[in-house]
Image (cartoon, grey):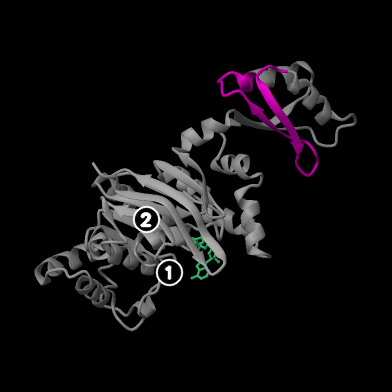
Amino acid sequence: MDPAVLISGLKKCYGSLEAVKDVSLTLQPGEIFGLLGPNGAGKTTTIRCLCTLTTPDAGRVEVNGISVLENPRLARQYLGYIAQEVALDKVLTGRELLRLQADLYHMPPKVARDRIPQMIALLELTDWADKKTGTYSGGLKKRLDLALGLLHQPDVLVLDEPTVGLDIETRSAVWQFLRDLQAAGTTILITSHYLEEVDALADRVAIIDNGVVIATGTPSELKDQIGGDRITLRIREFTPDDEAQRAKALLQDLPCVQEVIINGAQGNSLNLVVAAQADALMTVQHALKAADLPTFGIAQSRPSLDDVYLAATGRTLLDAEIAAAGNRDLKAERKQAMKGT
Ligand SMILES: Nc1ncnc2c1ncn2[C@@H]1O[C@H](COP(=O)(O)OP(=O)(O)OP(=O)(O)O)[C@@H](O)[C@H]1O
Ligand SMILES: [Mg+2]
């Protein structure tokens, strides 16, 4: 069977800027695939090439074995695209926009007549369908956008940052909706710079940085590749002798501990990379207790996708975005955005 999406050796320049240098991805039918990377990494450009919205400079791009370059009209029938920026015509109603979309996709009138009310009901737009979209909230616009992208029942749904700016309830609803679509057989390509979102939703992930894919795999595979679990703990604040250093020296000698970093405002937090084994936490706890070093808030966790990004690029995704965003308080924005996930 042909892959649902095949992108191979994709390259796209804007003038002298190489927005996409070398991207290769294969999506199997029915999977949710996450494209992760900081601002300006080339995610939207990759997706725009796939969705026939811009022409690549080099590479192969196929949907269900159909070349989007040679046969864009046919390829488009298989593709649903939901853009990063919602750009709805404000003076039309939701239902009118859905009719327009049906015409654009050459849907037979009878099919459109059946399907438009179905989409309105599915996305819970019944009360709003006949109101002008200029009066819609951000969440409603996104839901209408999803309805428009799904109207022609595409095999492959491509969503660019689908949950940016949505409240927690709407975000959860979108996630559930995507999972339901997947269960019904749709292949989904989603971009995000929310690590937690991609981690929770995607079967497989590609991390893209500076126009190049730097890692591909399931979230678990990627985390396994960098090895080790993380243990974080705090020791007493304001200790007379340097307990953090004492703890570090002690823990470094344990066979299950690979690395110890002291941080935190008071220098009383320790981050450990340990062997991924269940008794690592107990071993660490016992060693500290035996040396009379009490601990607080000790926890063991798998590495995150940010640890994967860090291992590949030497900086965290958040650092990369802070560099790209200038003065915006991204940490606060991220915290707000991830509440309840
Ligand atoms: N139409 C365009 N003309 C010129 N440069 C562009 C154009 N579109 C994108 N770029 C540049 O190409 C690079 C990749 O942009 P792209 O939008 O693909 O990144 P992204 O990964 O989607 O970022 P974000 O997370 O901010 O959405 C950036 O440097 C961007 O400024
Ligand atoms: Mg983008």
- Tag shown at residue 138: 1
| Rendered view: 161 above or below 304 | below
> Mark 2 and mark 1: span between their CA atoms?
13 Å
Q: Which residue is mark 2?
A: 174
Instruction: Residue 154 in the image: state x and y as whole percent.
Output: 25, 57
Q: Which residues are magenta?
A: 254-282
Direction from residue 105 to residue 250 in the image, left or right: right
| Rendered view: 70 above or below 264 | below
Q: Quadrant of residue 324?
A: bottom right
The tag earlier along the polypeptide, 2 or 1, is 1
Q: Is residue 164 visible?
A: no
Instruction: Residue 285 in the image: state x and y as whole percent.
Output: 68, 21
- Tag shown at residue 59: none
**Membership of 99 in magenta stretch:** no
Instruction: Residue 32 in the image: state x and y as whole percent.
Output: 36, 46
Return the residue found at the far bottom.
Answer: 91
Instruction: Residue 197 in the image: state x and y as whole percent.
Output: 47, 49
Amino acid type, residue under disc 1 in the picture: Gly
Direction from residue 75 to residue 165 in the image, left or right: right
| Rendered view: 305 above or below 49 | above
Residue visible at 57% across and 40% down in the picture: 308
Amino acid type, residue under disc 2 in the picture: Val
Return the residue found at the far front.
Answer: 58
